[in-house]
Image (tube, helix red, strand yellow):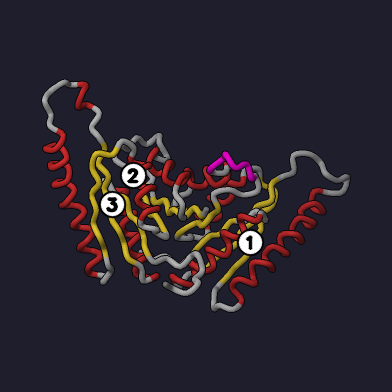
């Protein structure tokens, strides 16, 4: 058994950047490659009168910024990193599990909480769903 | 002590096991990570107070119950230790008896030993397929002070 491919789903929260830092350092330590993933769901309400594609494009620009920020963590190291954005889905959990499956990753590294910083919630809903449904091991970072 | 290190530097891995198939799989992952990261492993088996001890009223003596449970754990804990030895990994075995909550025992031990990572199987011995995530794994993920790798 080898662990050489890590999936790192991020949501742009402070916590997910911390997780990214952890994941890239871990990848460095165990010599693995990383796929950074962000999932953009179908918006609950029409935010713009523009097309939905325009909405996705706008969010994508923001996400590219996050990827650039995370890039600082690994640029000094010799890591193999791939970035991926999935749009137009309804379930973030399902998307993450699917990508993990398709890309044949060995582990998923995810933060215990994402954007919802409700302190009493010890485990965020997305993380809870990923831990429950992923086919591969999941590393939950505090 | 050691100079400032990134948080993800894994030096000590805690591996709580219960003898189930999934816990052996968790052991495989722990050994693989320990090998790559040059870390040591602490295998821990927590034995709770048996539920039926009062229910059946029979004079089951706790010390002998724990003795038996310890003995049966020796065999499969030894198997994990053997694999680690082949990979030249520093491994320590530990059995804790008389615990009221397995989750509490694991997270308290993890904190006391200041481990960097806990590797645990999703479901243990109560292998009801409906329970995608066992209560022990769930509790450990929620309450541990350090990152937790959940293996299925």
- In the image, which residues are magenta? A117-122
How far across and down, in percent of the image, does residue A18 sit?
59, 60
Furthest residue toward front: B1
How crowded pointer 3 is (Cα within 10 Å; few <14, some 14-19, many 20+) is rated as: many
Q: Is residue B118 left or right of residue A99?
A: left
Q: Main secondary structure of the magenta part?
A: loop
**Pointer 2 indicates a residue of which chain?**
B
Q: Residue at the location (61% across, 49% down)?
A: A114
| Rendered residue at 14%/38% (across/down) | B63
Q: Which residue is mark 3?
A: B44
Q: Residue furthest right?
A: A49
x and y percentages locating residue B136 in the rendered image: 37, 41
- Same chain shared by disc 1 and disc 2: no
Q: Judging from the image, what secondary structure is the residue with disc 3 in?
A: strand
Residue B148 against residue B125 in the figure, above or below: below
Residue B105: which disc? 2
Chain of residue at mark 1: A
């Amino acid at each position: 058994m080898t662990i050489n491919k890590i999936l790192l789903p991020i949501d742009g929260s402070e916590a997910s950047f911390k997780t990214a830092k952890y994941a890239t350092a871990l990848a460095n330590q165990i010599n693995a490659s990383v796929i950074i993933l962000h999932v953009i769901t179908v918006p609950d309400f029409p935010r713009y009168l523009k097309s939905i594609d325009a909405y996705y494009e706008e969010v994508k620009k923001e996400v590219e910024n996050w990827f650039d920020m995370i890039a600082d963590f690994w640029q000094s190291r010799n890591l193999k990193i791939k970035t991926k954005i999935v749009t137009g889905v309804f379930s973030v959990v399902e998307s993450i599990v699917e990508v993990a499956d398709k890309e044949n990753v060995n582990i998923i590294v995810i933060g215990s909480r994402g954007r919802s910083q409700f302190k009493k919630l010890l485990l965020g809903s997305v993380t809870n769903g990923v831990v429950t449904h992923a086919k591969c091991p999941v590393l939950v970072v505090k | 002590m050691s100079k400032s290190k990134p948080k993800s530097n894994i030096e000590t891995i805690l591996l709580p096991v219960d003898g189930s198939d999934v816990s052996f799989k968790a052991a495989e992952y722990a050994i693989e990570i320990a090998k790559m990261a040059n870390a040591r492993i602490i295998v821990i088996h927590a034995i709770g107070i048996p539920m039926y001890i009062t229910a059946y009223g029979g004079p089951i003596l706790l010390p002998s119950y724990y003795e038996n449970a310890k003995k049966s754990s020796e065999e499969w804990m030894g198997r994990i230790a053997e694999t680690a030895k082949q990979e030249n990994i520093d491994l320590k075995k530990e059995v804790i008896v008389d615990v009221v909550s397995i989750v509490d025992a694991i997270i308290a031990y993890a904190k006391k030993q200041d481990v960097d990572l806990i590797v645990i199987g999703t479901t243990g011995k109560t292998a009801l397929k409906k329970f995608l995530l066992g209560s022990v794994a769930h509790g450990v993920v929620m309450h541990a002070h350090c990152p937790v790798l959940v293996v299925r």
